[in-house]
Image (spheres, rainbow, N blue to C red):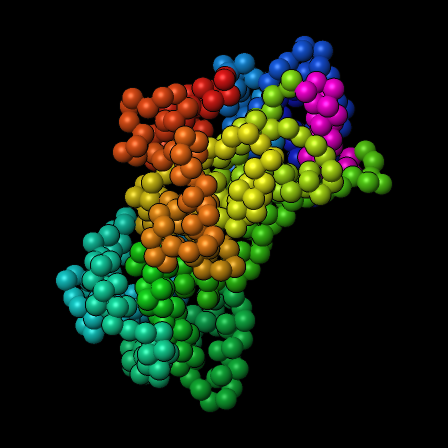
């Protein structure tokens, strides 16, 4: 890799300087960065954080790609490369799960019975089951159930139900699903015993439950019917609460949450969050490579800025990079590391609305300006994480599957910023008020009606995919314009 060590900090295992690859940043490399800024009397630093789910080589390529954006603004660029490589793991495992017989069978069952409760498929109202042939035809498409009538499902389907009534109907729902499954009882039992134990990320406790029920004389397919009923109810419940992500994506999310990804949130997303925190842990009593790279860097940077108060520092975070920035701000406050920041710039941030509220909105003294570039919800909804399998964006998947709470509000998703029900109370109103503050221009939406070709520099983006913000010409030009000021 030709990128100079003056332009990146590679974070090692547990946020330290320890080596885990061919590329390693040492404490002396950070010393060299600080010396370079001081000796060349540099006036601006742009500290960039890429998304946290990519592998190291991709992080280095992004660091190299972003260099001209900051150089053209007269700023010295430093990218934090904090690789995990987990985005590819997520996509691969979702695709593998989707190709198993058990998942396909569960998918058809939940679609059939949730569709019957909600209506909205093929002009049908609630109470009419979808023929399996039609379900299979839809599942063969790149975007299954694209023509699902959401308003029909919300008004006549979910609108005619209360959560109390939904729970009261459990026995009838289980009976219907049992009747649907009865002819497939032997196949279901075989899939649970043979396929499920070899399927990566399948929650094996679900097999244990089925075996325990079988030992009590309760058929395996009845156990599965009860599970499917629970999943169907959660899909419908999310329509009642208006927290669904569209019919097909919500069905997929709920099946994954129940049967497959019990540990994925903790393993993948929780692990990524831990990585975002670890690099800023205190270095008291630590030496050499055991020190935390992020903390070492901001301690040196704070000392430099104290001697050179004219030094301007801008932070840029894409996707999970926003989490790293929030954790940096929090740690700096807790450790009494004083930094004066000019701009905090988020690109499609994957931090929760709660984290952004607590670390950005609640502490305006930490920075002078904030701006967020993100997609409109129609682009977010069309940006498939895995074609034909999960037909929403990475941020939707984080919100619907990886976070502990389903439909967890993510800061970069427009759906939570509208002020519409059910997002018409706190903390949503505080975030909306912050972003809508007159004359601050804190929110830039892709190709929005507000952002015309005549919009001033710094207020333009045409990114229509989650991963496109660091490639999008207008976004890059906007970053340059802001930092150049």
Q: Quadrant of residue 446 in the image?
A: top left
Q: Nearer the viewer, residue 113 or 293?
A: 293
Q: Is residue 415 left or right of residue 270?
A: left
Q: Tell me the residue at 14%/62% (across/down).
A: 123
Q: Quadrant of residue 74?
A: top right
Number of disc labels: 0
Relative placement, left or right, of 254 versus 311 is left
> Which quadrant is the N terminus positioned in?
top right
Residue 353 in the figure: left or right of residue 164: right
Q: Residue at x 48, y 84 (%)?
A: 214
Write down the quadrant of residue 466 in the picture: top left
Placement of 454 over or under 336, stated as above or below: above
Q: Is residue 18 visible?
A: no
Q: Main secondary structure of the magenta part?
A: helix
Q: Residue furthest right?
A: 285
Residue 305: say if magenta.
yes
Find the magenta span and give its range: 289-309
Observer-nearest of 319 and 485: 485
Specify whether residue 104 is painted magenta: no
Q: Between residues 244 and 164, which one lies in front from this camera angle?
A: 164
The residue sitting at the left extreme is 123
Position in image of residue 154 (x %, y %): 26, 63
- Using the image, determine if residue 478 lies above or below residue 348: above
Taking the spot 59% from the left edge, 47% from the top edge, the residue there is 273
């Amino acid at each position: 890799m030709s990128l100079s060590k003056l332009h990146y900090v590679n974070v090692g295992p547990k946020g330290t300087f320890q080596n885990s690859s061919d590329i390693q940043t040492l404490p002396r490399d950070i010393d060299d960065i600080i010396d370079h800024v001081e000796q060349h009397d540099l006036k601006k630093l742009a500290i960039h954080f890429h998304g946290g789910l990519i592998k190291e080589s991709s992080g280095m390529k992004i660091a190299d790609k972003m260099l001209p954006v900051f150089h053209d603004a007269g700023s010295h660029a430093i990218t934090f490369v904090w690789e995990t490589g987990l985005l590819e793991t997520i996509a691969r495992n979702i695709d593998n799960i989707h190709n198993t017989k058990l998942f396909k069978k569960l998918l058809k069952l939940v679609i059939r019975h949730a569709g019957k409760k909600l209506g909205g498929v093929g002009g049908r109202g609630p109470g009419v089951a979808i023929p399996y042939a039609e379900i299979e035809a839809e599942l063969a498409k790149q975007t299954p159930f694209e023509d699902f009538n959401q308003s029909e499902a919300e008004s006549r389907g979910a609108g005619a139900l209360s959560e109390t009534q939904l729970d009261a109907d459990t026995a009838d729902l289980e009976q219907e699903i049992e009747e649907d499954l009865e002819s497939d009882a032997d196949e279901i039992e075989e899939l649970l015993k043979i396929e499920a134990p070899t399927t990566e990320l399948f929650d094996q406790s679900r097999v244990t439950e089925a075996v325990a029920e079988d030992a009590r004389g309760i058929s395996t397919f009845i156990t599965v019917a009860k599970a499917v009923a629970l999943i169907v109810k959660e899909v419908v419940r999310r329509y009642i609460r208006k927290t669904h992500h569209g019919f097909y994506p919500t069905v997929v999310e709920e099946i994954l949450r129940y049967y497959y990804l019990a540990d994925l949130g903790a393993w993948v997303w929780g692990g990524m969050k831990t990585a975002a925190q670890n690099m800023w842990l205190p270095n008291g009593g630590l030496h050499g490579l055991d020190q935390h790279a992020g903390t070492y860097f901001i301690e040196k940077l704070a000392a430099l800025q104290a001697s050179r108060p004219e030094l301007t520092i801008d932070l840029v975070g894409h996707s999970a990079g926003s989490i790293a920035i929030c954790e940096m701000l929090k740690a700096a406050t807790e450790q009494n590391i004083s930094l004066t920041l000019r701009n905090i710039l988020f690109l499609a941030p994957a931090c929760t609305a709660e984290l952004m509220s607590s670390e950005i909105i609640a502490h305006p003294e930490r920075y002078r300006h904030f701006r967020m570039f993100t997609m409109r919800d129609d682009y977010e909804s069309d940006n498939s994480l895995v074609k034909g399998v999960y037909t929403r964006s990475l941020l939707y998947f984080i919100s619907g599957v990886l976070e502990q709470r389903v439909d967890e509000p993510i800061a970069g998703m427009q759906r939570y910023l509208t002020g519409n029900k059910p997002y018409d109370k706190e903390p949503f109103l505080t975030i909306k008020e912050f972003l809508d503050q007159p004359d601050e221009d804190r929110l830039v939406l892709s190709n929005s009606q507000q952002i015309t070709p005549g919009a001033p520099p710094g207020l333009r983006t045409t990114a229509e995919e989650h991963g496109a913000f660091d490639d999008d010409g207008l976004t890059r030009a906007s970053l340059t314009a802001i930092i150049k000021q």
